[in-house]
Image (tube, rainbow, N blue to C red):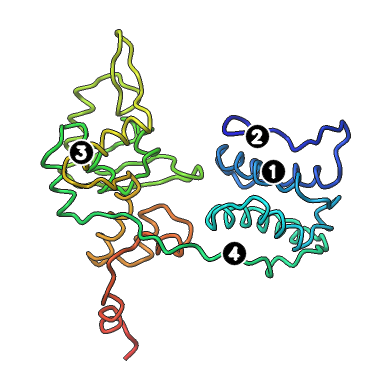
Amino acid sequence: MLGGEPVPVRSQRSIMTKIEKQIEEYIAYCRDMRNLSPKTVVLYQDALNRLLKDVTASSIEKLSNEMIEEHLRKHRWSPTNTNRHLTTIKTMLRYFEKHGLKLRAKVDLLERLIEPDSKAVFFTKEEIEEVLANCDHLTWILIRLSFEGGLRIKELTELKPSDIEGTRITFIGKGRKFREVFVSQELAEVLQDWIEQHPGWDYMWMWESDGKRQLYTVNGLRQRMRKAFFACGHDNFHPHALRHSFATHILHAGAPLYTVKEMLGHSKISTTMRYIHQLDGKLERDFAEYGAY
């Protein structure tokens, strides 16, 4: 299932087995207590449905490391996808372990695969300014806002005029978490002018067809920005690269790592570290400035 409401875990039988009930309980917990997005819940549901089809255990307690490892090997996923499925399974096992179940599986012995060391795409401020100097007005706003605010493409797409108040922008971001970002006075004035030029719009980015307003899709905005970067010789652009660029730029400007984490809306510092690039020599300089002696 790729979208919509999660379907309860059920076999073809009318009576659910114990393990099916347990997984349904865990999915309900993810949906109702962890407040995860519907998309994330569906991904968890899909991963655990696949597990159910492959294992013979009648309950969570009887799941073994061997069963789980064989399940993961069977599908021949990439290391990244294998690790995502493994994380979902391990998180579920820890949930039941925390609630008193004595598990056969040894969670800490379920090891992640080594993922290829791929360099994420990012751009320097100078490269971004070159693109900004050679694109139309709407694309200029989209790129500048993505870079200055570190917005995800979905957050950018769903932005509303009511979310913007001067240099402050507030919205509900990934994981249904409240986010607050700030932009320069220059960009704030451009955004205000855009809002005034388009009165009555429910969302910031819309277009008209046959007298009806249509909301830009994520892909529509992505293609618009990609075209601008491609015109300047960057054929590897994707919107998330602007978040990487934002994080790297503000860290180089002197922002503490914790501040970068908060500005990106991350829950963990380890996630933020994956967004940082070109730090050669920075650790040594930081030690010289902040070291104990």
Instruction: Measure the C-alpha gap from mark 2 to mark 4.
Output: 27 Å
Marks 2 and 1, how far apart at CA? 9 Å
The amino acid type found where label 3 is placed reads Ala
- The residue that disc 1 covers is 27
Q: Can you tell which of label 1 and label 4 is closer to the viewer?
A: 4
Nearest to N terminus: mark 2 or mark 1: 2
- In the rendered image, which quarter contains the N terminus? top right
**Most distant residue in the right direction:** 15
- On the rendered structure, is 282 left or right of 118? left
Could you give the CA–CA distance between mark 4 and mark 3, rounded to whole angstroms? Answer: 38 Å
Amino acid type assigned to the residue bearing label 1 in the image: Ile
Q: Is residue 197 left or right of residue 15?
A: left
Rendered view: 279 above or below 121: below
Mark 1 / mark 4, whichever is N-terminal: 1
Please name the residue shown 77% across and 64% down the image: 105
**Mark 4 lies on residue:** 112
Label 2 sits on residue: 6
Q: Earlier in the sequence, mark 1 or mark 3?
A: 1
